[in-house]
Amino acid sequence: MAKTNKSKISTRSIKARVLILLVFLLLLYIVLPQIDSFAESFAVLKEASLQLVALAFLLVVASYFVAGATYLLLAVRKLRFGRTVLIQGASAFANRILPAGLGGLTLNVEYLRKQRHTLPQAIAVAGTNNTLGFIGHLCILAVLVLTTDEPLTGTVRLPYEPLVWGVAVAGVLIAIVLVLAPGLRASLLRLLAGIGKQFVSYRKRPLRLFTALGTSMGVTLISVAVFYLSSHAVGVPLTALQALLVFTVGVLVGTVTPTPGGLGGVEAGLVAGSLAYGYGASLALAAALMYRLLTYWLPLLPGFALFMFGRKYYL
């Protein structure tokens, strides 16, 4: 028995060391080449309203607590709030080194598995969280558009074509793999059956699900508020509706950009959205850089610290 326990500890230790090595390599490969972008973002602070910047950064911190509350509501097993918030901070860092939110999604799944969730349950909880985020975003858009008299001026060409091609290529590759690997296909079907069962179980907890939708909408509203404050801090007087629409464009472009955290894509989307509303290129760029400074660059080191400190909760 003692030998088995030693073997488990040794395996866990090896996994931790490999993870640390991979993280450092990814940081060197991804973040260091973007130091110029960080310098540009930081330079914007010289002309910004520090009071608005400080308030926006406090909202960024608050978003991790609200995101943690969403996972508490969706989880099958009981989770500790402080530990779950810590993982959300670590997830923010993980999303900086992997594209399309895969880092945060994977980290949350591993965390849930460590908290006595099965793999299908963990994937279903994380998937439901992301789905609620998408639905909540649409609900906020619909409410603001339907309840405001503000004209929806400004049009931005969204990258529908790259998105369609990306989904099509991914679908073809997945289909080829599943055809050539029957064992993998059978495992995937069992996993999907377990995930479907978990999704159906939420019918027994409608109040928790709707409350989770509310907290998920809270995360989106906080992100929009951060962009709104970032814009006003550098002299771009976006309205609440304009901030939401420009933020949505940034999220869409960032999602189809195959870089960690949508680096480059989010900035391009935010600038394009602001330009569509008639704001100058220099101001639009300043607003985008300020937002990314607060949500991408400043949380990087604290997120890394949480990522390393919380290893025992997901390894």
Image (cartoon, helix red, strand yellow):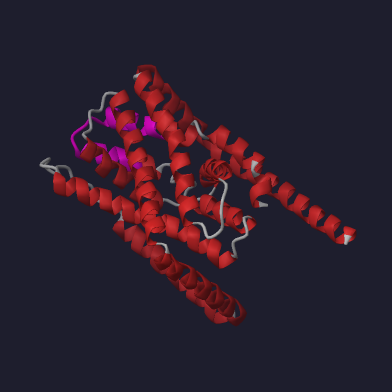
Reply yes or no: does residue 166 show up in magenta: no
Relative depth, front residue between 240 and 175: 240
Residue beneath the point at 35% across and 34% down: 226
Relative depth, front residue between 72 and 289: 72
187 relative to 203, above or below: below
Q: Measured from the top left, where is residue 87 in percent x and y?
A: 56, 45
> Is residue 221 visible to us here?
yes
Q: Measured from the top left, where is residue 72 in percent x and y?
A: 50, 51
Q: What secondary structure predominates along the stretch shown in magenta?
A: helix
Residue range corresponding to the magenta coloring = 268-292
**Which of the 4 image quadrants contains residue 222?**
top left
User: How many labels, in total?
Assistant: 0
Reply yes or no: does residue 272 show up in magenta: yes
138 relative to 187, above or below: above
> Is residue 100 visible to us here?
no
In the image: residue 276, left or right of residue 57:
left
Residue beneath the point at 14% across and 43% down: 148
Q: Measured from the top left, where is residue 291 in percent x and y?
A: 38, 33
**Which of the 4 image quadrants contains residue 20?**
top right
**Looking at the rendering, in which quadrant would you find the N terminus?**
bottom right
Residue beneath the point at 60% across and 53% down: 111
136 relative to 228, above or below: below
Residue beneath the point at 46% across and 60% down: 127
In the image: residue 151, left or right of residue 162:
left
Q: Measured from the top left, where is residue 170 in percent x and y?
A: 45, 67
